Image (cartoon, rainbow, N blue to C red):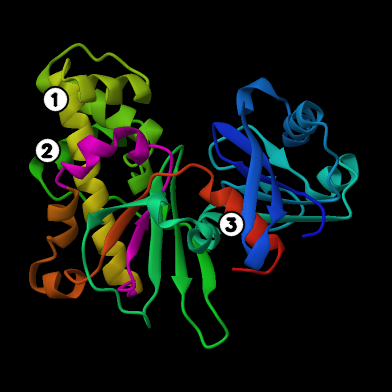
């Protein structure tokens, strides 16, 4: 990329824009990253214009990673009021080339461009290099993608695995599911494993305990859990992590992702210490007679920001 490339990671709550440059050895450098809240702008293009105005740049090419399925002439965000019409963005930003990819496609594409210190080990293991790698993580929603090795290089397959039906394992989880089902007749795993999902779990546990049902924002729940000031908040985060472990382990079984699991999304890095001490690994391995299938699978957590921005640049340059 001779000229800077405009890249963006657009989720249900925030849009993160940056400029990407090629550096020696084919590596990618990300600079001038800024976050914008979706609720502050009517359209994606408005947010992009605000960013470009602030950095004084006018790139001719762009790649946006978006939180939702990428197909058709209009992209509808799963957890946002925004809609993205690629032709309108291309024309409005005066771009010669514009590409849109799924956000977890970009996250998966960015993994190989991150330094080793961008990850922490959650569970050690021995990956099978011939098997897929699962990329999964909770944020505004629950994203999921597969990195599949092939003779021609890796193939990235974005999925909507976050919308599979939640299968409770314990009596408490059944009660939580029944609480959520009063508002959402079909309870997907995303109804629990997302920012809104953590709120759902906390509200359900309050109701089960007969405590006041305060509808706290997700960041207040995690803060209370980390500080130890609210036992129900701590229990909600513990249950969140345990369910994530079970869901990730089930996804390994259903996809054959013995190449490893990479955890992303916006929530886990913020609760890193609590997460690493949680029951995630125990429930990940709790697969009965299939425990031996998932036991060798390593799990690591992305703790650096901007992985999807690297992936958007890589996708634009065909480096996935």
Q: Choose between 236 and 267: the one closer to the eye.
A: 267
Q: Disc 3 versus disc 2: distance between alpha carbons?
A: 39 Å
Which residue is the site of mark 2?
Answer: 172
Taking the magenta stretch, the answer to whether it contains residue 312 is: no
Instruction: Find residue 213 and report its horizontal and vertical position in percent.
Output: 24, 15
Q: Which residue is mark 1?
A: 208
Callout 2 touching callout 1 (CB < 8 Å):
yes
Residue 216 in view of the camera: yes
Q: Which residue is mark 3?
A: 311
Q: Based on the displayed image, in which of its 4 quarters is residue 127 positioned?
A: bottom left
* For marks 3 and 1 on the same chain, the one whose residue lies earlier in the sequence: 1
Task: Decide if residue 70 is in sight here.
Answer: no
- The kind of secondary structure element at disc 3 is helix
Q: Quadrant of the N terminus?
A: bottom right
The x, y position of residue 104, in whole percent, is: 51, 55
Residue 125: horizontal and vertical position, in percent?
A: 21, 68
Query: Mark 3 against mark 1, which lies toward the viewer?
Result: 3
Quadrant containing the C terminus is bottom right
């Amino acid at each position: 990329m001779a000229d800077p490339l405009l890249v963006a990671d657009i989720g249900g709550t925030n849009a993160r824009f940056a400029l990407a440059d090629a550096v020696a050895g084919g590596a990618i450098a990300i600079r001038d990253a800024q976050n914008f809240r979706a609720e502050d702008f009517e359209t994606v293009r408005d947010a992009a214009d605000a960013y470009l105005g602030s950095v004084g740049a006018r790139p001719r090419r762009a790649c946006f990673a978006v939180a939702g399925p990428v197909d058709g002439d209009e992209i509808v965000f799963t957890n946002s009021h925004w809609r993205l019409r690629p032709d309108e963005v291309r024309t409005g930003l005066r771009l010669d080339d514009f590409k849109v990819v799924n956000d977890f496609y970009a996250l998966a594409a960015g993994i190989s461009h991150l330094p080793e210190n961008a990850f922490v080990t959650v569970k050690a293991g021995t990956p099978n290099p011939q098997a897929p790698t699962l990329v999964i993580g909770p944020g505004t929603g629950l994203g999921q993608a597969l990195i599949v090795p092939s003779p021609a290089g890796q193939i990235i397959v974005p999925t909507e695995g976050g919308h599979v039906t939640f299968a409770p394992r314990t009596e408490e989880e059944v009660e939580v599911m029944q609480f959520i089902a009063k508002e959402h007749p079909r309870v997907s795993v995303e109804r629990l494993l997302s920012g809104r999902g953590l709120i759902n779990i906390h509200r359900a546990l309050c109701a089960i305990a007969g405590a006041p049902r305060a509808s706290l924002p997700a960041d207040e729940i995690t803060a209370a859990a980390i500080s130890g000031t609210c036992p129900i908040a701590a229990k909600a985060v513990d249950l969140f992590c345990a369910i994530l472990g079970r869901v990730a382990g089930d996804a390994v079984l259903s996809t054959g992702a013995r190449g490893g699991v990479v955890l992303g999304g916006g929530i886990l890095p913020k609760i890193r210490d609590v997460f690493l001490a949680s029951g995630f690994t125990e429930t990940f391995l709790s697969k009965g007679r299939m425990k031996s299938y998932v036991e060798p699978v390593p799990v690591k957590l992305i703790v650096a920001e901007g992985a999807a921005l690297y992936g958007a640049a890589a996708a634009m340059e065909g480096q996935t």
